[in-house]
Image (spheres, helix red, strand yellow):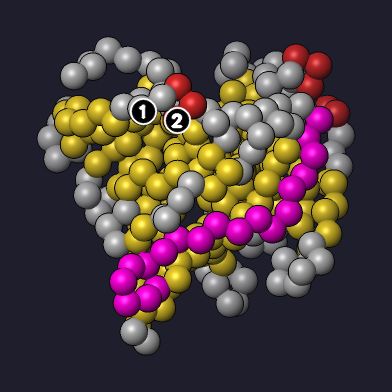
């Protein structure tokens, strides 16, 4: 059982009190969090290099079954071969992997559902954003179709957005997407897009502008969106030097 490893992506399941983490070799390491410190209990090893898991995301899917609304928390993986796979679920199955990108999946993020009033944040997800080294950002609808035999997860492409570089970090809140790339020529820049007409088949993309003074001088290493008022996207992000060029954290 590996104990000293470099961990990248994480997904924590409150229901099972387990932490899923991705290792640099494409394996997924599971921790039991019932104890302090937590204990490594399982390692999921890919059968081939193409099936190495590079990204993981946890989503809570709500769907109707026998006239009752139920939920299932699932863990999805983004693999080296560009496919999305189901790693863990309590009830649902995914009949086959989805070929999301031509090449490696470099980032994945779920979008939190918003209530009918436009103000209340829900605990469920209906959209998934992915980025790949094919230089595309893709937005997917994700849900579950229930039947007598099994509850099947479906993932359907809504729109794809060309990216100026390889997307490294992605964040989606309501209809706003924020992306940073790993290219040196694009370092420190945050690219933002707005999706309009999501309820129809004609989704329009608007590129949002901001002044260059608001960008960073080094690569963006992490950023996080604060789930506040539904009309605004609050972002916190920091560079590899942990400071902005104004010297603030």
Disc 1, SS: loop
Quadrant in which the C terminus appears: top right
Furthest residue in direction bottom, as rendered: 67
Q: Would you say residue 148 is visible in this rendering?
A: yes
The residue lying at 70 percent from left, 16 percent from top is: 218
Q: Is the magenta stretch mostly helix, strand or loop?
A: strand
**Does the segment drawn in magenta span residue 202?**
no
Furthest residue in direction left, as rendered: 35
State which tag comes first along the sequence, 2 or 1: 1
Which one is in front, 80 or 108? 80
Name the residue tied to disc 1: 46
The residue lying at 68 percent from left, 46 percent from top is: 138
The reply, left or right, for residue 224 in relation to residue 211 is left
The residue lying at 27 percent from left, 12 percent from top is: 4
Callout 1 crowding tier (Cα within 10 Å): few <14, some 14–19, many ≥20: some
What is the x, y in percent for residue 52? Answer: 44, 27
Name the residue tied to disc 2: 51
Picture layout, residue 248 above or below residue 146: above
Q: Would you say residue 7 is visible in this rendering?
A: no
Instruction: Point out which mark residue 63 bears.
Output: none
Q: Are marks 2 and 1 in contact (CB under 8 Å)?
A: yes
What is the x, y in percent for residue 162? Answer: 80, 39
Cα separation between marks 2 and 1: 6 Å
Which one is in front, 164 or 96? 96
Picture layout, residue 182 above or below residue 161: above
User: Bounds of the magenta span?
Assistant: 146-164
Callout 2 crowding tier (Cα within 10 Å): few <14, some 14–19, many ≥20: many
What is the x, y in percent for residue 78? Answer: 50, 37
The residue lying at 55 percent from left, 72 percent from top is: 115
Quadrant in which the N terminus appears: top left
Disc 2, SS: helix
């Amino acid at each position: 059982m590996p104990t000293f490893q470099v961990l990248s992506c994480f997904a924590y399941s409150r229901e099972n009190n387990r932490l899923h983490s991705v290792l640099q070799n494409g394996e997924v390491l599971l921790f039991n969090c019932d104890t302090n410190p937590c204990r490594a209990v399982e390692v999921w090893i890919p059968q081939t290099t193409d099936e190495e898991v590079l990204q993981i995301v946890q989503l809570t899917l709500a769907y109707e079954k026998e006239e009752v609304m139920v939920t299932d928390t699932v863990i999805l993986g983004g693999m080296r071969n560009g496919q999305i796979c189901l790693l863990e679920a309590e009830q649902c199955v995914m009949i086959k992997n989805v070929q999301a990108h031509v090449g490696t999946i470099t980032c994945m993020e779920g979008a939190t559902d918003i209530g009918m009033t436009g103000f209340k944040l829900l605990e469920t997800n209906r959209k998934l954003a992915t980025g790949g080294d094919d230089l595309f950002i893709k937005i997917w609808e994700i849900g579950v179709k229930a039947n007598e035999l099994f509850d099947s997860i479906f993932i359907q492409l809504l729109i794809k957005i060309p990216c100026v570089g390889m997307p490294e970090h992605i964040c989606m809140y309501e209809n706003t997407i924020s992306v940073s790339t790993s290219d040196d020529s694009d370092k420190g820049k945050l690219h933002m897009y707005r999706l309009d007409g999501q309820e129809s088949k004609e989704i329009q993309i608007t590129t949002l502008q901001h002044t260059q003074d608001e960008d960073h001088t080094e690569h963006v290493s992490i950023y996080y969106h604060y789930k506040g008022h539904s009309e605004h996207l609050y972002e916190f992000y920091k560079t590899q030097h942990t400071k902005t060029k104004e010297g603030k954290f």
